[in-house]
Image (cartoon, rainbow, N blue to C red):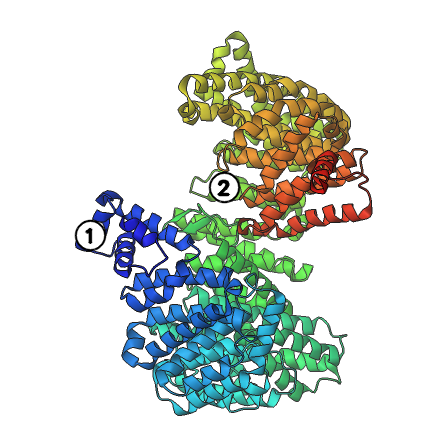
Amino acid sequence: MDTEKLRDLSQPMDVALLDATVAAFYGTGSKEQWAIPFTFLGVADSIERTAADHILRDLQTNPDMWLQVVHILSSTQSLNTKFFALQVLEGVIKYRWNALPVEQRDGMKNYISEVIVKLSSDEISFRRERLYVNKLNIILVQILKHEWPARWRNFIPDLVAAAKTSETICENCMAILKLLSEEVFDFSRGEMTQQKIKELKQSLNSEFQLIHELCLYVLSASQRTELLRATLATLHAFLSWIPLGYIFESPLLERLLNFFHVPAYRNLTLQCLTEVAALSFGDFYNAEYVKMYAIFMVQLQNILPSNTNFVEAYANGTSEEQAHIRVLESSQENINLLLVGLEYLINISYADDTEVFKVCLDYWNSLVLELFEAHHNLDNTAGNMVGFHVLWISLRLWFEICLPLLQFTLDACAFGYGEGLGSQLMQRRQLYAAPMSKLRQLMICRMAKPEEVLIVEDENGNIVRETMKDNDVLVQYKIMRETLIYLANLDHEDTEKQMLRKLSKQLNGEDWTWNNLNTLCWAIGSISGSMGEEQENRFLVMVIRDLLNLCEITKGKDNKAVIASNIMYVVGQYPRFLRAHWKFLKTVVNKLFEFMHETHPGVQDMACDTFLKIVQKCKRKFVLVQVGENEPFVSELLTTLPATIADLEPHQIHSFYESVGNMIQAEPDPDKRTEYLQRLMELPNQKWTEIIGQAHQNVDFLKDPDVIRAVLNILQTNTCAASSLGTYFLTQITLIFLDMLNVYRMYSELISTSIAQGGPYASRTSIVKLLRSVKRETLKLIETFLDKAEDQPHIGKQFVPPMMDPVLGDYARNLPDARESEVLSLFATIINKYKGAMFEDVPKIFEAVFQCTLEMITKNFEDYPEHRLKFFSLLRAIATHCFPALIRLSSEQLKLVMDSIIWAFRHTERNIAETGLNLLLEMLKNFQSSEFCNQFYRTYFLTIEQEIFAVLTDTFHKPGFKLHVLVLQHLFCLVESGRLTEPLWDVATVTTICEGLLV
């Protein structure tokens, strides 16, 4: 009975009952509070919250519920109930506001305004109801987006007038203005039309004088901390878009600088000054700008003297002070104080805080890039230099702007841009020599870890193998590497001197720590290619010599592991040096072979990775007979291969085989290449022959788990070799291909039997997982070879027909849980590779995979995720390269194809939806140019149009907007082009309807 009473909105709502319902939903009421209403509702205690949820949802979706909002807000004391009512109102404002009668709109906006004024007039109620007032402010701003300026022209004058009546009202008015600015300038995209956004921006600009006067009045007259902070926060939101005259031609900057020395306002003031620094204003306000920084620098030196220990001060500072340093900036109107400002930033850069360092690093990268560009573009005119400065300055926030602006202003004064540009640039270079030298030291000391380094120190101080990549560190490394390269180009001698001095301290033990050695070697590796070849040769010889000596004299496995990782990283970064010095290259590679026997975690992995990297850059050197040698290095390596890989794990052996495959691929003589390949694959081929021989005698031999692992290992070794050899792997894969397909067929039958007998759980057993790994690796090996092989049709004809039944037929016959998604990607690769040559095979592929895969993936949006994407990739390959095969499909089969495409672009998984849309575009373009254009579009035009509009207006599919528009553009342009010569509708149906209307 009470349920219906609550849902009956024809009379004022029982607010006490609504309070109890909301309390039950949030679990905030006592059992006594809930008992009365929910006894009447007949809801058991265990489902009270569910029942309350249903009731509140029903009320929220009722179109008349918003009419009860004023009654509810006036009657309830529950904050949760008030928020529920405002949530209902917010939905109406967002979706139905303009459809409401004028009287209702005016009544609601007047009521919200009155409640806000009432609550913010009194200090006690304003603080007590702050959350409620904040929500009311949001509602008011939502109304403003519809009403102002056209239907509420006096809003800004009324707001400013109200703000002058009370300090608490003024504080809340500032919050409303800040919200309004954010809604219009920051969050309007996707919420309002461009015309509406433009209109609101113009209105704010035209009426900003009142707001500006109010802010200046508060900053000069008020002593209230909360109000001043609110005003500064509002100014921060406004400063990025207001006319420049309000900033530079008024006392605003002076007032802001007066607040900088006060701790309570320092961060907000600095944020405001940062916004000013980000503005693009040309040269007109340079004098005011320099004056601002002069005052700022004086205050900064009073707050934080330049001789302060910044690392210690930051570590001991309060959270407020640390936030201040994060956006700290300094400058001065003369060269000496400019250099003091740079000294500040260098000291701040040593603070042990990643976010602080990132901000500083962005600035240093910008500064060094500008100096590098100026140094390497001496032919540029002075005017071009000015343009570069202005453009650069306008793109940076305070931390990346104010020093460069003053640098340019001071440089122009000191060196007189315009005459003798080369000598002036040299003077600039000398001016910045000292801070740039300190910056090099900073970059070397704090160099981030590159991706190639796998050996790290864990939280317990142990040297271990890295298990997870840190993307933030990798991004930081790339920026630091770029910065250090610029620094090296500005002064090679200083860079070399600092690095060698720091390395000598490692050797004599004066500065020896893992971190110091690591950052030094990462820095050395990062500047590869920045020096001249002769200087680089001299430098690298000394570095490698010292690192090898350090490895010899240092005791302890962890220490040696750290040194080894650094040696491997450094040598891997200098392929030019290695190519030019064969003996050194051979020494390095042999050292890597030594490291491959070192069992410390990570050393072998890094040795194999470095070996691969060096071989890829220097592979020609290994197949030539070098001076003083009797045979090519690759031949020598193949002779000792068993001993070299004896201590490696399987995945490391695979990497090793890929490396040697790269060497063999560089051999121009086909006979030698074939010989090297046979020698390389001798070990895995012996094992393979042994396994197949045993299987011929007893097929159950292949069921042994150890044998399955051995087969998997052999296949993985072949895949790695195929990835580097490409077409030249043909003789090897031909040798094992048919036996490999037989093993594939047998393991597939074992998997199907296990799943049929054990149900879905069987697919998760270790033996089935192992068998499926062999199947996947078989498919991966074939796909890798065909993808890497040159485009030779005879290779496709040799390998595709034998796969039809063992692979495609097996896929069709198998249970869904036993089907491998790699089958789909394999045949997509084959069609993309051999294109029209696969035309005759498409019907067989379609028959084997289409229907059964669709049944797997269309039951829901979650199951078989890999099959989904690979299925549509296969379909797109067919549509792109073998379209005539699709035309031959029956109408039922084509409908199935189109339904699957529609299903794909309705998918919430972005990559699947995009694949479906790209596939649809391919299909539409192909059918447009075919003889079946009219027939196809008559059947599917309206369906496609409706489905595209459905996803276009659905927020779940926003990422596909561009492709949605391209599809619609194609459809509309097709109609306008006159290509369609038949009606898109059913003529008979339309004729019947028209005749009925005439009658």
Q: Nearer the viewer, residue 166 or 39?
A: 39
Q: Position of residue 92 (x, y in %)?
A: 46, 61
Closer to us: mark 1 or mark 2?
Answer: 1
Q: Position of residue 477 (x, y in %)?
A: 53, 59
Q: Nearer the viewer, residue 99 or 491?
A: 99
Sequence-wise, the earlier of marks 1 and 2 is 1
Q: Are marks 1 and 2 in contact (CB under 8 Å)?
A: no
- Residue named by callout 1: 36
- Residue named by callout 2: 605
Q: Position of residue 596 (x, y in %)?
A: 50, 39
- Residue 576, compared with residue 42, is above or below; it is below
Amino acid type, mark 1: Ile
Callout 1 secondary element: helix
Q: Which mark is residue 178?
A: none
Callout 2 secondary element: helix
Amino acid type, mark 2: Asp
Say whether residue 122 is visible. yes
Q: Nearer the viewer, residue 223 or 257?
A: 223
